[in-house]
Structure formats: structure tokens, C-alpha cells
Image: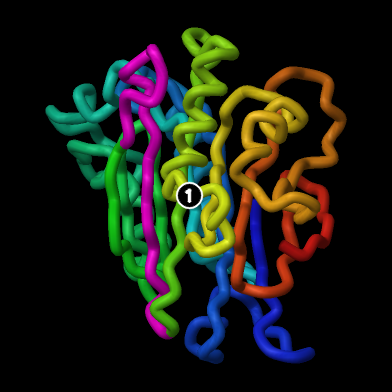
Amino acid sequence: VQEECRMTEDTSVDAHHAAAAFTDTTLALMSYNIGIQNKEVHSGRNWTQKYKRIRDDVEAAFTNEAGIQVLLISEFGNMFDDIDRHLRSGVAQPTGHKVRSTCELFEDLLASIKLPHIHVVADPPYVALIDSECWQVEHHEVLENLCTKHDIKVQHLILEHVNTSETFRCFNAHMPSSVATPKRKEDCAKTLCDIATGSAVPQRTACMPWILAGDLNVDLGTMSRWCQAFIEKGVPCFSKSEWPQTSAAQKSRFCLVTRNCFGFLQIVVGDSQSTMCI
């Protein structure tokens, strides 16, 4: 999911450099479900090839003319068997360096493509890559006990814009299909919406802008029904892919963005584009 914001009047600028060019707030965010297994990183024969694909994707995201500012990665390793436990002894990477954590792995990757200003927040299986020239991390935590499967966790970030001090809340979430029953998915979604709105649904328009991204393994219609009480009636807030939805996984390719004060947004999911005002 990539979001770009028109800054002032009819003036446009690529999102990567917008923070330095204007005093208005711009958010450019991408959600990336990566699907990497623990064993692939520490002993997989194809890791070099997959690593290069991840590196190329990260580089393209942050250096493209319409580059992004925040990349939320989910499913980097197993949610219930922390990949850092397997990296602790030191695992050599295609760069030639040994890394001992997910954070070190991505810092090493970013150094190899000369992007030292990208800040890494790693909570396996989640990784947030943040352009520190645009956004600073004001708050960071891992949320648990969101449903009856208590060790399902979600990365929760509050980001502050370096120029305008506007804040933005991000939930980086994945619901593993092996354990996420419909009731657990619903409980997680509603709990996250409740956190975002501060349990003050009638005053929800006063809360900071927020996004629920990742992969909850649920279709858009069901998600919309669960979140109905937490979003403004008649205001579009879902962005989705227009890829052919031939599998359940493809049907969950969307994100929920609400109470956005950043103006005009272009939403991109997968290879499709649609424009909406939120």
C-alpha cells in the first residue's frame, strides 16, 4: 500500500522529499507481507536469492521517484518461534557480515544499499523501516492479549513528522491462518480499532490518523462490518488490490486508513491504482 499526498494547491512533489520541501504533512507508506520462514534465513539454500529480492524491493521503495517514507513488513519469521532466537549465534548474510538479530540483518541490508537514514524497528515477525528525515518514532510497543490466542502479536507505532509534529498511528498486523479463527480475527480487529479511537467512538473524528495494515487473512467485506462502529459513515477508508481474487490470501490484500488529515491521497495496492479522498 503506498499513499502519496498532494501538498498545497496544485503543487506536487515526490513523497520521499516532500518533508524537506513543504511544511504540510505528507505520508507515503507501504505494507509488505514478506512470508519468510525461520529456516530460510539461518539455513536455507535459496536465502541468497530471496535476500537479494528483498534488498532490491527495499531499495526501490525508498529510492524511487515517488519513494515511500515508511515500509511495514510482516511475516518475517514465525510469530510463535522468534527468528531472533535462531540468529543469536551469528548467521552470515550475502553481504559477508554475520548478524545476530532481525534488527542487525536489516541494518546491514540498508548499509549495503547506502540508506543509513532509514531507521529499523524490529519486532519479529514485524519490521518497520522508517525514513528518519521525515518521521521519528514517538511510541513503540508490541501488543499481545488481543484475543484468546494470547501470543498473537501486533506491532504498534506512533510516528511524529519531523517538520510539522503531526502524529500518525500504525498497526502492523498479521493473523496466522493456522490459529486465527474468525472470532479471534474479529476480536483482534475490534481491539485495535478501539485502541486507535480511544474507546471514544462518538469523538472518533478527533483521534489522530491511523492505519491498520498487514494481513489479517480476512476479506474486505467482513473487515468493514467489524470496523463499522469505529469509522465515519460514508467516508471511504479502505484501499484494496484489484488483482484477481482467486484465493483467500488475495482477498485480504487491503488496508484500513481512517481520519487522515493529510489531504488528497493516492492509494496503491499491488499493481493497481485508485484515487480516493479520506
Q: Which residues are magenta?
A: 143-163
Residue 20 visible in rendering: yes
Name the quarter where the C terminus is drawn. Answer: bottom right
Q: Residue furthest left?
A: 89
- Residue 148: give x, y in percent of width and height: 39, 13
Amino acid carrying mark 1 in the image: Ala
Dot 1 corresponds to which residue?
200
In the displayed structure image, the side of residue 235 where residue 96 appears, left or right: left
Q: Residue at x 38, y 13 (%)?
A: 149
Q: Residue at x 42, y 32 (%)?
A: 76
- In front here: 165 or 69? 165
Residue 138 lies, with reference to residue 109, above or below; the image says below
Q: In the figure, residue 14 lies in which quadrant?
A: bottom right
- Residue 101: give x, y in percent of width and height: 22, 38
- In front here: 39 or 66? 66
In the displayed structure image, the side of residue 39 where residue 238 appears, left or right: right
Q: How many marks?
A: 1
